[in-house]
């Protein structure tokens, strides 16, 4: 390999390096190089010096080439610092783009492992590093995350605030998101008013705060950013309304059941001693594979006879025996051929039919189960015979449709609070019947529809009129919902008028859950904060 090629292959970002030799040692690629810069800058005082004190060799692990690990043996120098006041008498030179202080990896490999750690954390990142022919344990990757510099925290114009669980039911933190860019700004270790208000006070300039109905965040916003406009999230408002509707439906659950309908009376059919219709013995078959075949052959033979063909040509054309063609030609209709020795013929199933009729009347209609029961009673035939007879019973005694399930509280709540165009025709009819039986639910549905129009059309200024209409009705659950709106009325009106929402915050909240699962039990706050902010 030439030096020019190797320079482009490994050190395309490094200047001042001379490659002397590259060898393949088993599964390892070994590169010997030396630094060639005339002088270097002291890391303590920044003074450049060209006075060489000594030389030594650094072994650096680099990114793999063709699946082979790469080790660089780099000869570097120690220089004497020319600044007498500097605390460093000598210092080691660093090659920009290749080395860093105390590093045993190249700058490129260090950057790759840092990105792998941020995206996949410990175990998954270690598995990917092994695939890349780089040795890095899960603990090493976590240390790389912690050593990354703190991301710069900027002050957004529109800030989203929400809580997330560090340990569900025990410890909670706060996530702050820039709604305009949909990127996380910071993570706070708790959800107290003091912590959030202190952050807002330290970062002036927030104009809009998107939040849920939490009183702690509302108070923190008033203390830390008194001039900011609070916007209550529409999803949380609608969720509270759905809960109020569900309470109303529970109060009238007795009217959800549909009235019983009288079942239609069947016409009387002659039956035999077993209670089943007798099988006609002298009538031709009208269905079945044999019946269909005979009727098709009879039609084809008579069509050719009408064309003037003889029996022999017909037999050759249809591929039938001449006697068969003669029998079909003599029969005026196919029914004459279907009343024969097989009609009314005794079956191997006849001794077991009374038992089948009894089990059918008891509600057992599964052919496989009936066949197994008959086999235990000594039935010597096959399952197909039982299946055909069970099919005849189904045609003679069709079962009524199973009774329709009565709508539950959750069903009715969903029908009332969903978009009408997302209900099928059956749900629409059942909801209409329920609202007709229960006037309270009918009025509740009207209030829900008017609130949905108000919210979708951003008509928050009309909320007072909607509240007055609700208070005029005797609907306690909706009254409680209206009382809750009044406690945070300005934020609710802004939420129903402005285009901002906490959707981006909820998305990052779900992402935090995924990151916590990746890190199993090692997702303490400092590590989680770094991953959330750096991954964005």
Image (cartoon, rainbow, N blue to C red):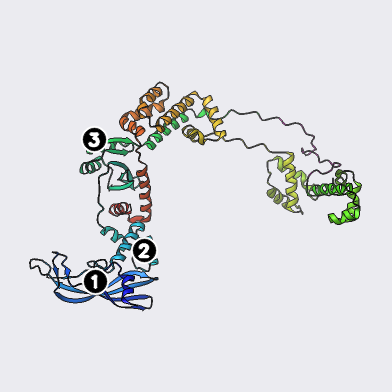
**Residue beneath label 2, please?**
126
Task: Give the quarter of the image for residue 479.
Answer: top left
Residue 18 in percent (x, y) is at 26, 75
Horizontal relation, residue 420 to residue 244: left or right: right
**Residue beneath label 3, please?**
227
- Quote the CA–CA distance across marks 1 and 3: 56 Å
- Quote the CA–CA distance across marks 2 and 1: 33 Å
Q: Nearer the viewer, residue 24 or 406?
A: 24
Say which residue appears at 40% left-offset and 36% top-offset: 239
Q: Nearer the viewer, residue 480 or 324?
A: 324
Figure check: 109 above or below 369: below
Mark 2 or mark 1, earlier in chain: 1
Figure check: 514 above or below 454: below
**Residue beneath label 1, please?**
16
Residue 205 in percent (x, y) is at 23, 41
- Quote the CA–CA distance across marks 3 and 2: 48 Å
């Amino acid at each position: 390999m030439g030096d020019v090629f190797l320079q482009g292959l490994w050190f395309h970002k490094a200047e001042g390096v001379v490659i002397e030799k590259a060898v393949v040692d088993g599964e390892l690629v070994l590169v010997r190089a030396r630094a060639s810069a005339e002088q270097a800058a002291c890391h303590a005082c920044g003074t450049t010096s060209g006075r060489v004190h000594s030389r030594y060799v650094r072994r650096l692990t680099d990114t793999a080439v063709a699946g082979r690990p790469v080790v660089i043996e780099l000869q570097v120098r120690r220089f004497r610092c020319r600044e007498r006041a500097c605390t460093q008498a000598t210092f080691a030179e660093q090659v920009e783009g290749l080395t860093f202080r105390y590093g045993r990896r190249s700058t490129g490999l260090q950057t790759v492992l840092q990105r792998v750690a941020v995206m996949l954390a410990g175990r998954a990142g270690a598995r990917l590093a092994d695939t890349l022919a780089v040795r890095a344990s899960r603990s090493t990757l976590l240390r790389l995350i912690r050593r990354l510099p703190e991301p710069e925290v900027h002050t957004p114009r529109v800030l989203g605030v929400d809580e997330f669980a560090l340990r569900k039911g025990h410890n909670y933190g706060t996530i702050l998101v820039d709604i305009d860019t949909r990127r996380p700004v910071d993570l706070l270790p708790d959800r107290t008013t003091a912590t959030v208000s202190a952050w807002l006070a330290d970062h002036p300039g927030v104009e809009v705060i998107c939040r849920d109905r939490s009183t702690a965040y509302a108070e923190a916003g008033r203390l830390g950013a008194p001039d900011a406009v609070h916007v209550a999230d529409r999803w949380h408002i609608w969720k509270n309304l759905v809960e109020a509707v569900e309470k109303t439906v529970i109060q009238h659950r007795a009217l959800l059941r549909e009235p019983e309908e009288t079942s239609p009376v069947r016409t009387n059919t002659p039956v035999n001693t077993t209670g089943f219709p007798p099988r006609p013995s002298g009538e031709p078959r009208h269905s079945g594979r044999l019946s269909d075949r005979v009727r098709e052959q009879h039609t084809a033979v008579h069509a050719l006879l009408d064309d003037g063909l003889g029996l022999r040509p017909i037999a050759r054309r249809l591929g039938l025996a001449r006697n068969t063609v003669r029998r079909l030609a003599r029969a005026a209709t196919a029914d004459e051929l279907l009343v024969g020795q097989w009609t009314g013929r005794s079956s191997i199933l006849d001794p077991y039919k009374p038992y089948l009729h009894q089990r059918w009347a008891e509600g057992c209609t599964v052919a496989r189960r009936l066949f197994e029961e008959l086999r235990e009673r000594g039935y010597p035939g096959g399952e197909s015979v039982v299946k055909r007879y069970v099919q005849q019973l189904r045609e003679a005694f069709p079962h009524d449709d199973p009774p329709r399930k009565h709508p539950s509280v959750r069903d009715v709540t969903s029908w009332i609070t969903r978009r009408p165009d997302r209900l099928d025709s059956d749900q629409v009819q059942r909801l209409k019947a329920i609202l007709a039986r229960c006037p309270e639910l009918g009025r509740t549905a009207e209030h829900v529809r008017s609130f949905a129009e108000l919210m979708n059309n951003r008509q928050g200024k009309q909320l007072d009129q909607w509240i007055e209409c609700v208070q005029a009705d005797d609907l306690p659950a909706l009254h409680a919902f209206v009382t809750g709106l009044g406690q945070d009325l300005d934020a609710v009106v802004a939420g129903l008028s402005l285009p901002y929402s906490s959707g981006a915050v909820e998305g990052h909240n779900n992402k935090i859950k995924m990151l916590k699962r990746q890190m199993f039990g090692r997702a303490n706050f400092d590590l989680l904060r770094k991953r959330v902010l750096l991954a964005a």
